[in-house]
Each structure stands twice: as structure tokens, then as C-alpha cells.
Amino acid sequence: MHVVRGRYAEARVYGWYVLALLRPGVEVPTFGQPEPFTADIERFTPDDLKIIVEEGRRQTDRQLADLEKNRARAATLLTIGLAELAVLAASAGRVFPLGVPVRVVWAISAVLVVLTIGGAASLLTSRADFGRLETRHLAAGPMPVLREAALGYAHAVGLGEETVRTRITVLRDGVLLAVMAALLYAVIWPVVTTAKTPGTAPRPSPTGENICRATCIPSSPSRPSPTTTATGDLAPTSATPIPS
């Protein structure tokens, strides 16, 4: 098992998990090495061995349950990260025409979101190492089966505890990155929402003539009213010949 210690161990382990997406099945590191079991198993009575085997089974089942809970929370974190990435991508057209500080904050937020997605996806797909008992080895062991099972569980549970502890830390770091990305984008959100989308010209307001053309009904041309003479007869009107 590869163990990472020293300065920036937490950040290095998280980066290792993100890079594990490119290498499926690779062994991911932990923060500590499980302590080996060095006690003498021969000094325990059969009743004591039964208790050790029972507690070992319970601890192994609890570790597997913790792994499933960790994966379920990582799936939720992955959904949140993808939603944040969609929001950042939708606002890219408004961010780039703005000043350099806004673009820098947007870029940092985008990098944090990408790291969040990488860590969450790695928790779902990367290899998880747990100790287990091989039935064939248990049956072919040099000691009685009960004593062999108790010794096997005593050695196996340490590896699972380190794996669960490391994955909980990686999940916490992913949540922290998602929160930081959201806070950074919230800082530039008022500037981004009030910025105008480039390439769109303001639409001119319609003038009175345009409104009249759109809404008014054209009237028919006025026809001259007939005039009357002094005797009350209608005066002849001049007719304009219409060419055929």
C-alpha cells in the first residue's frame, strides 16, 4: 500500500485520486499504514476466538457500508459539480468581454469545479482496497479453522480502516473545493448578470409614423361632392377619361 506523508499530503492524495481517472484500476494511496497484528493468537480460548471472528465480521461489514455511503455522497457531489460547470460555461460569453479581475476569478472558479468533478468521479470509480479472508486459504491453513479465521480478521480490518479514512478526507476536500468555487462565482455574479451580451444592438423604439403604419387603417380617397345650380339641378361635373 502506497502511503503519502509530509507537507501537503492531503493535496497530493487528492491530486493522486484525480489522476487515477486516467489510469483505471491503479492503486490509490492512503494517509497511513495499517498497524500489523503481532499478538499471540495461541493464548486465546475457543470462546475468545469466536468473539474475535464475530467482531471482525461486524467491522468488515461496517467498512463496506461506509464505502457505499461515501460513494453515494460522491455521486451527489458529482451532480453539484456538473451543475456548477454548466453555470460557468453559460456565463463565459459575458465574462470574457469584462475586465481582467473578473476573468481571473471566473477561471479560478472553473478550475476548482473541474477538480471537484475529478475527485468525485474518482471516488466512484477508483480502486478501494479492503482486507478479506480467502476461504481456500482458510481451509488449507496450518492452524484450526477458528483460530485461522480469528487471525485473518485481525490482519484484515486495518487495511479497510485506512481506506475508509482516506476516502472520507478526499470527499471532504471535494466539498470544500465546490464551496470555494461557488463563493468565488458569487463575488462576480452581480457584474456578470448586468453585463450586456456582445453582438446585440439595442432595438430602436418605434416612431409615430411606424406605429401608424402598423396600426392605422388607410382611408379611401375623398370624392368631390356634386354641386347644384341656382335652379336646383345638379351641375355637370367634368369626367376624366380613363384610358382603356
Image: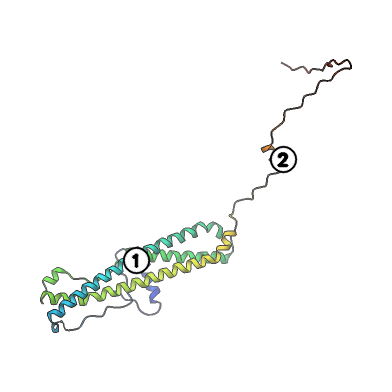
Q: Secondary structure at mark 2?
A: helix
Quarter holding the C terminus is top right
- Mark 1 or 2: in front is 2
Residue 85 in picture, x, y percent from top left = 46, 60
Q: Is residue 64 left or right of residue 137?
A: right
Q: Which residue is mark 2?
A: 209
Q: Which residue is mark 1?
A: 123
* Residue type at tag 2: Glu
Picture quarter containing residue 76?
Answer: bottom left
Residue for point 69% across, 36% down? 216
* Residue type at tag 1: Leu
Alpha carbon separation for disc pair 1 and 2: 66 Å
Q: Is residue 23 above or below residue 41?
A: above
- Residue extending farthest to the right is 230
Circle 1 crowding by C-alpha within 10 Å: few under 14, some 14–19, many from 20: many
Circle 2 crowding by C-alpha within 10 Å: few under 14, some 14–19, many from 20: few
Quarter holding the N terminus is bottom left
Q: Is residue 39 left or right of residue 206?
A: left
Residue for point 32% across, 70% down? 28
Numbered marks: total: 2
Picture quarter containing residue 79?
Answer: bottom left
Which sits earlier in the primary sequence, circle 1 or circle 2?
1
Along the viewing direction, whichever of 53 and 94 lies nearer the viewer: 53
